[in-house]
Image (cartoon, rainbow, N blue to C red):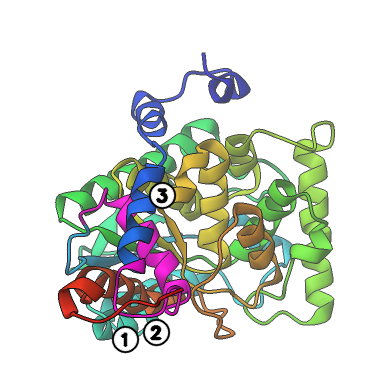
Amino acid sequence: MTKIAADFRIALPASLADVIAAIHPCDPADAVEARRQLDSLTKPIGSLGRMEQIAERLLSIFAREIPLPLKRAVYVFAADHGVTASGVSAYPSAVTAQMVLNFLKGGAAVNVLAREHRAALTVVDVGVDADFEDAQGLCRMKVRRGTSNMHTEPAMTEAELFQALEVGIRIAEISRQHGENLVAVGEMGIGNTTAASAITSVLTRHPVEAVTGCGAGLSSEARTRKIEVIHQSLQRHFGANPEPAPLELLRCVGGLEIAAMTGFILGSAARRTAIVCDGFISTAAAAVAHAVAPHVRDYLFAGHCSEEPGHRFLLRAMGLTPILDLGLRLGEGTGAVLAMPIIESSARLLMEMATFSSAGVSEASH
């Protein structure tokens, strides 16, 4: 029995165990080859800055054969959170379902950006407290209508957690079948910054106060209440064990969409897909995936840095540098989609620029 399975006292589902086992590190030799290619291009060495690092990672992910043009997609995982009953959000839970309908009508920020940057958009209902009719761009894969209130009981049962993880793995399979190789991870769920803050505090070992922001516009008084709820939730579930196993942490204080994103990231990494995390919530899912399978990091890009304070702690803990820093705090996958053109431009520069030799340009003498 694996350590993770032992933490749950049950066997991991075979598909989840297989996915984790299939996540291998990128070959360091591919990064060396990428650096050799970059240094041979008609430019001063290192003059393309961080775009060169992005190109290195892409060449490593795709084992020296970057499939241009990259086929882009953004997946928005949606679910409700029982903890909203404890007064942690400025918006009512009904907004989650309302925003899903907005996505399906094409009216949200992520819709606009996905259209502009040729990223196919799919909304995954993994736990919204509403029922939706079939619609183009919607995957109905509901585990239940929102989590339980983590303030009073575990957010999910073990069965629900594994089912949500399996949703993400299945979506990663579908994505790969569609030939998508650059995917953005977005979310929608009123109350999910509370769950992400709890996860962040435990995984990064920083105080709840330091990693918890105002979410979607909380007052300072309401933020204080949110911090109290997180403290009490962590004490309730982990008082005697302040370092729970990552999946147990996710089960007790996470969300269905965070669990599905975790599964999606694991499944995408196992299939050598380039993954772009968005903001605080999707990066919390990436951090859980990274805690379960550290080689996940080789396949991750941080699209941007959110204004939510916990996001910087997560990025630092995983050693990820955000591509953009625009003061965004919307979620939905917006920052990840905005980063996609920069990622693909980095690949184009590596693959299409002339070398000093091919262009007949003299190299630096020293």
List the residue tagged with mark 2. 109
Residue 94 vs 271, above or below: the answer is: below
Closest to the observer, 179 or 360: 360
Q: Label 1 to label 2, Cα distance in Å? A: 5 Å
How crowded pointer 3 is (Cα within 10 Å; few <14, some 14-19, many 20+) is rated as many
Q: Quadrant of residue 162?
A: top left
Q: Nearer the viewer, mark 2 or mark 3?
A: 3
How crowded pointer 1 is (Cα within 10 Å; few <14, some 14-19, many 20+) is rated as few
The amino acid type, in three-letter code, at marker 2 is Ala
- Look at 30% across and 47% down and name the residue there: 272
Closest to the observer, 248 or 246: 246
- Look at 35% across and 32% down and name the residue there: 22
How crowded pointer 2 is (Cα within 10 Å; few <14, some 14-19, many 20+) is rated as some
- Residue 300 percent location from the top left of the image: 44, 56
Horizontally, residue 350 falls left or right of residue 315, namely left
Residue 301 vs 234, above or below: the answer is: below
Count of marks overlaid on the render: 3
* Residue 60 belongs to the span the image colors magenta: yes
* Residue 134 belongs to the span the image colors magenta: no
List the residue tagged with mark 1. 112
In terms of sequence position, does the residue under pointer 1 or pointer 3 come before the other? 1
Instruction: Kindly identify which numbered label has been placed on residue 349.
Output: none
Disc 1, SS: helix
Which region is colored magenta?
A: 39-65
Q: Tell me if I can see residue 355 in this picture.
A: no
The amino acid type, in three-letter code, at marker 3 is Ile
Q: Are marks 1 and 3 in contact (CB under 8 Å)?
A: no
Q: Label 2 to label 3, Cα distance in Å? A: 23 Å
- Residue 175 percent location from the top left of the image: 23, 54
- Residue 284 percent location from the top left of the image: 58, 56
Instruction: Kindly identify which numbered label has been placed on residue 265.
Output: 3
